[in-house]
Amino acid sequence: MNKLIASTSCDREGTFQGLKVAIESAMEQGAKSLFILSCDGNEMPVEQLNDYFQHLDIPVFGGLFPQIISGTDNLERGHIVCGLGQALPVGTISLANGSPARWRETLESQCPWLANSKSVITLIDGLSQHIDPFFELLYDHIGPDKPVVGGGAGSLTLKQKPCLITNQGVLTDAALVIGLPLGADIGIAHGWHQMAGPFLVTKSEGNTIHTLNYEPAFKVYRESIESGSDKRFADAEFFTVAKSFPFGLENLDQEILIRDPITEENGSLVCVGSIPEHAMVYIMQGDEETLLNAAQEVTKSFSSDPASGIGANTLIFDCISRGLYLGDQFNKELENICSTLPKDALLIGALTLGEIASSPWGPIQFLNKTIVLSALQEQ
């Protein structure tokens, strides 16, 4: 059997020269397309990257992320360049106009190959205002039978800037859709549990919660956390406290979807990912033990035994706020995941601004504070 990922090179310096050397090495080994994971902390000039990617003569896709993952290492600087044995088709959808009708036109014109793809990778600007509407459209377009996995690119500064790598250059406020010729198993786990609630979202707009139970959202959030823990918002920056207390959005099937509050603005809470009005939400809590245990459990939701070799190519999209929460223990999370995979498994991926995965019941979910693992089947 042939592996889709034919070669992998990890440059840990994060220089433009290191990126070029890795790409040239992959092409010399016969790569027919390139999957590139880079760190936003590399701080390379976008103009230089644009000129270089526009002159590559094979398909390229990828993103700039807060951190990248190679095996049990998470890197704040560097590149991972995967040389792929096939020329994978890539669709590029600009989200800036906010028009689902136009997104659909682009999918239909650029991505007729989606009908024959067995699974899909999708990367998106994690700070776009159009994430959930796009995934609703993508799900309507491809249906429930194709596994979808991916992550949100962008900067930990939470300032929107070019972050998606394409043959057109590095793009902002866009989504990439990549068709794979093989199936994939998806594992999802987070390890958070309910601390307070539920609360009714009485006013929200996109990814901003204005009121909970008809009161200012931050007031309810702060009072619940300060009464149930020793954390105080007056003692630290907002995210320093909030990273330990995400929201849990209850779905109709009682699954809990995690949402990360990242800033407070005039009494409202801005999250990564939308929260609809009239939804029921909980304030969640976790600790190192529950999060690390989730890392050991994530492969149990695969439909096939990863030890059989199905996970020889394994992609991981893990939330950057999990990495920040766990700190020095985050390597233990990666070790726990690797311990459940075949010995020769290649684990690569990124710490993301939101994780993307098909849910067991169909729809494509944009997740927070969650591990998404995808074991690519071999050909």
Image (cartoon, helix red, strand yellow):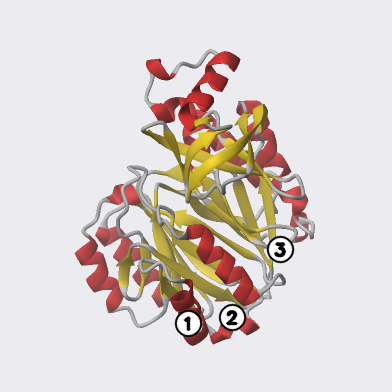
Which residue, given by chain and number where applicable, does mark 3 sit on? 362
Q: Quadrant location of residue 332?
A: top right
Secondary structure of residue under mark 3:
loop
* Place of residue 134 in the rendered image (x, y in percent of width and height, measured from the top left): 51, 65
Q: Earlier in the sequence, mark 2 or mark 1?
A: 1
Q: Quadrant location of residue 10?
A: bottom left
Residue 38 in the image: above or below residue 282: below
Which quarter of the image is occupied by the C terminus? bottom right
Residue 232 in the image: above or below residue 20: above
Q: Are marks 3 and 1 in contact (CB under 8 Å)?
A: no
Of marks 3 and 2, the one in the foreground: 3
Q: Amino acid at mark 2?
A: Leu
Q: Amino acid at mark 3?
A: Gly
Q: What's the CA distance linking mark 3 and mark 1?
A: 23 Å
Which residue, given by chain and number where applicable, does mark 2 sit on? 114
Identify which residue is drawn at 60% across, 76% down.
Answer: 141
User: Does residue 283 appear to the left or right of 145 in the view shown?
Assistant: left
Q: Nearer the viewer, residue 277 or 86?
A: 277
Q: Are marks 2 and 1 in contact (CB under 8 Å)?
A: no
Q: Nearer the viewer, residue 228 or 295?
A: 228
